[in-house]
Image: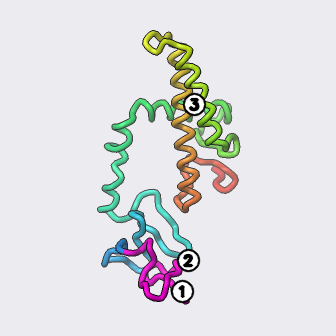
């Protein structure tokens, strides 16, 4: 008969095992009551539900998330473009709003939008001479590529949240009214 994991107390395990696959070799000796380290993320256990945090709570494991060195410094122009799409989207969907927020009820079909923007981008790249673009053509191409990146990040955030990570602070929807 299956038993509960001796570390997280939530996952069912076979009788011959002590811990579930998630906790195996992940829990350090200094685990505090109610805290479990799984899949390189610190997960707090409460009533059999794992509450995830955007970043690990363990100071050593936080070093594995070099947000500035591993993201911002890798993609500064792309991230600036995504920020511009956020601004343009806020102007489109929330006209007159001073606060910048992602109203998730306005457009939720991220995967379809990614593919439509990709088709539009391919058409623009085939239409124009990439080495001889005017300002309008450059802007059209960048709007498409930045929209793809924005939608990919929105989709990634949505999946992270479905897996228990916190709702983005800049999100506004039926569950997280601002």
Using the image, tell me which numbered label, if any, was put on residue 159: none
Using the image, tell me which numbered label, if any, was put on residue 48: 2
Image coords of residue 13 (percent x, y):
50, 82
Residue 15 vertical placement versus 128 (above, below)? below
Say whether residue 39 is visible: yes
Numbered range of the magenta stretch? 1-24
Q: Main secondary structure of the magenta part?
A: loop
Q: Secondary structure at mark 1?
A: loop
Name the quadrant containing residue 122: top right
| Labels 1 & 2 near each other (Cβ < 8 A) | no
- Neighbor class of circle 2 (other Cα within 10 Å; few <14, some 14-19, many 20+) is few
Q: Secondary structure at mark 2?
A: loop
How far apart are labels 3 and 1 at the CA level? Answer: 48 Å
Image coords of residue 40 (percent x, y):
39, 63
Residue 91 vertical placement versus 64 (above, below)? above
The colour scheme is rainbow
Q: Residue at x 53, y 13 (%)?
A: 128
Residue 17 vertical placement versus 98 (above, below)? below
Mark 1 highlights which residue?
2
Image coords of residue 141 (percent x, y):
53, 22
Q: Nearer the viewer, mark 3 or mark 2?
A: 3
Q: Residue at x 34, y 44 (%)?
A: 70
């Amino acid at each position: 008969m299956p038993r509960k994991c001796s570390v997280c107390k939530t996952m069912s395990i076979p009788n011959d095992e002590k811990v579930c696959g998630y906790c195996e070799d992940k829990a350090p000796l200094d685990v505090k009551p109610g805290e479990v380290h799984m899949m390189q993320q610190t997960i707090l256990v409460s009533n059999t539900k794992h509450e995830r945090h955007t970043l690990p709570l363990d100071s050593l494991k936080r070093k594995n998330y070099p947000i500035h060195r591993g993201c911002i410094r890798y993609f500064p122009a792309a991230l600036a473009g995504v920020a511009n799409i956020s601004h343009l989207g806020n102007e489109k969907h929330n006209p007159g709003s001073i606060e910048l927020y992602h109203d998730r009820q306005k457009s939720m079909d991220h995967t379809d939008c990614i593919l439509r923007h990709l088709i539009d981008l391919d058409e623009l790249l085939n239409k124009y001479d990439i080495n001889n673009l005017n300002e309008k053509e450059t802007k059209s191409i960048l709007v498409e590529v930045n929209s793809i990146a924005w939608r990919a990040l929105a989709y990634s955030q949505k999946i992270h949240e479905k897996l228990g990570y916190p709702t983005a602070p800049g999100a506004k929807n039926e569950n997280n009214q601002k």
